[in-house]
Amino acid sequence: SLFEALLRARQNKWKRERVVDESMEVDDEEKDGDNCEADELLLSEEDQLYQSLSTLGWLSNQLQTPFREALHSVMMEAIKSLIAGDFETEGMLDQTLEWKSQVLVPWVYSVVGAEAYECNQWAAQLEYAASECFVHVRMNELFDLVTDYPESLPAVRELQLALDRTGRIFYETLAFEWRQALVQRLIHPGAQTSQIIDVYINTIKVLREMDPSGELLQVVTQPVREYLRGRNDCVRCIITSLTDEEGGGDLYEELKRQGAKPLEEAQLDEEDEEEPPTFDWQPPPSILQRRGVITGQVGKVSSSSRRAGDILSML
């Protein structure tokens, strides 16, 4: 559409004017002189075009749908090119919001006009839309976020921030997409049990960062837990990982982190009994404020979800 062409022209101009670093290169098509001239010609006539559309009153009625479709299409494409596959660089969400401020905000302002921009709260709409697109791009990379952990920790934390900016309404979709990614890429006969356990452990660590309450973890990992129970060598693989001092597996490191001693050094002590329970304990705050959007059970949290951060107890 015409709106899409105009916004792409602004996007290409922004790329050319921006200080190019290694993380964002201008491709050959955008360096082409003919394309640059076409973009400049298109942009030189856009003010007159918007004024004519405003005079006719078409922007608020007939052209509202194509305008928003062009906005969303180019936004998704631009944010994907900006952040996709980059899990280790910090500040990707800030770069996304910076792009929004430098490209989207001036364009929308020039299209709809100052009065409509303020009345329709376009600043808030664009802020929300940029965070929403950020979440959607990362949703297509959830399995990679898990397998690349802990290197992907910056991306995991920024995904949580983006979810917070959208009011957390995407957590149900996130849980579904994450479950599907695990089922499609992990739960099949070709995957070794040890590999499944390693990914399962990483999934626990990632979701512990995003949701200390454990609600998201219970929903996302349910298919993996059920599948592992049917694997005949599951217990053997867990025991091997627990005792693999030379290999330094995840479970062995987790056992060391919790201060467990080797069996030959263990001693019984009457004072080692657990302390009596207190009434001061409080569960971590729910990501959904106990609304049960994911689990469908308001205020009900299982004991296993309360121990979601404890990898050993989960296994």
Image (spheres, rainbow, N blue to C red):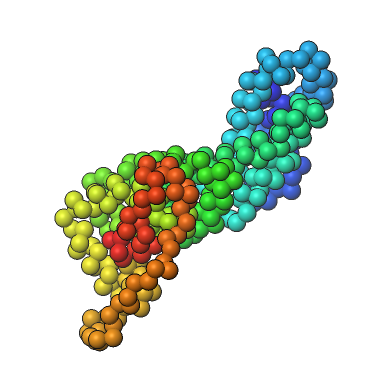
Residue for point 71% across, 34% down = 121
Q: Quadrant of residue 312?
A: bottom left
Seen from the viewer's position, the closer of residues 270 and 19 is 270
Seen from the viewer's position, the closer of residues 110 and 78 is 110
| Residue extending furthest toward the top | 56
Position of residue 44 measured from the top left corner of the image (x, y, whole percent): 82, 25
Vertical arrangement, residue 236 with respect to residue 17, above or below: below
In the displayed structure image, the side of residue 294 where residue 304 appears, left or right: left
Is residue 83 shown to the viewer in this render? no
Position of residue 58 measured from the top left corner of the image (x, y, whole percent): 73, 15
Is residue 227 shown to the viewer in this render? yes
Seen from the viewer's position, the closer of residues 131 and 249 is 131
Position of residue 224 measured from the top left corner of the image (x, y, whole percent): 29, 50
| Residue extending furthest toward the front | 279
Quarter of the figure with the C terminus: bottom left
Residue for point 45% across, 59% down = 284
Quarter of the figure with the N terminus: top right
Seen from the viewer's position, the closer of residues 295 and 81 is 295
Q: How many marks?
A: 0
Position of residue 314 measured from the top left corner of the image (x, y, whole percent): 30, 60
Vertical arrangement, residue 93 with respect to residue 51, above or below: below
Residue for point 33% across, 77% down = 275
Vertical arrangement, residue 222 with respect to residue 194, above or below: above
Residue for point 52% across, 44% down = 168
